[in-house]
Amino acid sequence: MTIKRFFLSVSLISLLICTLDAQAQRLTLGGYGEVALSRNFYSDNVYRYSNASLHKGESHGRFDVPHAVFYVGYDFGKGWTMQSEIEFEHLGTGTEVEKEFEEAGEWEAETERGGEVELEQFWLQKSFMPQLNVRMGHIVVPVGGLNNAHEPLNFFTVYRPEGEATVLPSTWHDTGVSIWGDIGTWKYEFLVVSGLDAMMFGRDGFINGGANTPFKFQVANTLGFAGRLDKSFFENRLKMGVSGYVGNTLRNTFPYEAFTNASLAAAKGTLLVGTYDFRYKGFGWIVRGNADFGYLSDAGVISRYKSSKGAASGAPYDSTPVGDKAAALGFEAGYDLFSSLFNVRDKNQQLYLFGRCEWYNPYMAVSGQGSAEFTEKLRVAAGINWFPIPEIAVKAEYSHRFLATQYNPEPSISIGIAYAGFFR
């Protein structure tokens, strides 16, 4: 090989490496995940509420991988970007099976959950300026503090905060269009997405299952409209946000069904959701809180119809009744012991001592529906979060779930480890 050819080859190889590196700089890889180990000092028997005295003193243990999520994003240039997110939940085997029983006016539910794989996000975005961005595809619906910041480093508990994760879809993701932007200390987002399905609502989770679909597409006979507005204060130490959702939910099934029954024909199942959340971080403290409220019109009509429909056809509907209202309130606070009490040379390390209290009820029955007092819960938790590096948290907590006096309390101990970050 001549010297001229040698230098030409080196130049071509260098150009190829520079081109590949430039492309790689546009690529974003990341994700988050959790591993959780729990000992629950209460029964997991399906009849633990209707026959509470028979299951007093029972306990069980569970090991779980609640979420393992991987991000892939790419910047095409000229304001065009792509983001995708695939999520593995619980990493078990088998399918989700739910059986409902109505016995002596009391409802029982038995649930066996297997591993699930979901495409949580896939969208293309055009950014015109920081104040105006348009996103289309499968999008996270940021209604509620948890859906807005659902990564495991954004809450202290080993598992996601129970209240919001019970009454709202979590993580709430749907297909549609989003317009969002940052305007100084304000951030806004408006979304139009496919509507929720009232046939998937139920007693134990209100609208939690409404964004799920058993089909290879999202049914959009009705549309949902969501919005979120955030404001930052004190150099971003305090952030407050309000969010909401409105949409009809009754006819969002496949195939579309025109009702001949008069009460069904007049019903729409209009859903209204309103939330408030805040986060404060400063002087060694992290404090978070949320308040969520949901209202569903025609809840009695929906409950009667979906119960009979599921029983008659074997359709994969939640045949438990759904109330017309649900609510969740939560508050947590943690103090970094390393910030002042201990002389820690590595400033990236943090050790938070935290407490959390939350109340929630996914089933506030309308007149004529059976009562289910066990759905109302007050949960308190206390524990630690150790961050050896900013991207990893080791968690431990004791929690106690208080129910109505006729039911057994539900204490538990959990430990876990979680990460969230970008690899490139």
Image: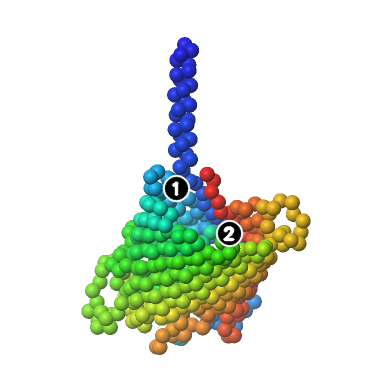
Q: Find numbered disc 2 in the image and state the secondary structure of the residue it sits on.
A: helix
Distance from label 1 to label 2 (Cα)?
A: 21 Å
Point out the tag, 1 or 2, that comes first from the N-terminus. 1
Q: Find numbered disc 1 in the image and state the secondary structure of the residue it sits on.
A: strand
Q: Residue furthest top?
A: 2
Location of residue 362 in the rendering, given as x and y in whole percent from the top left corner: 47, 77
User: In the rendered view, would you say 221 is above or below 25?
Assistant: below
Hey, which quadrant is residue 301 in on the image? bottom left
The three-letter code of the residue at mark 2 reads Leu
Q: Which residue is mark 1?
A: 73
Q: Which residue is mark 2?
A: 153
Q: Residue at x 57, y 57 (%)?
A: 34
**Depth order, front residue of 234/246:** 234
**Depth order, front residue of 368/354:** 354
**Depth order, front residue of 390/166:** 390
Q: Residue at x 67, y 63 (%)?
A: 283
Q: Residue at x 45, y 15 (%)?
A: 5
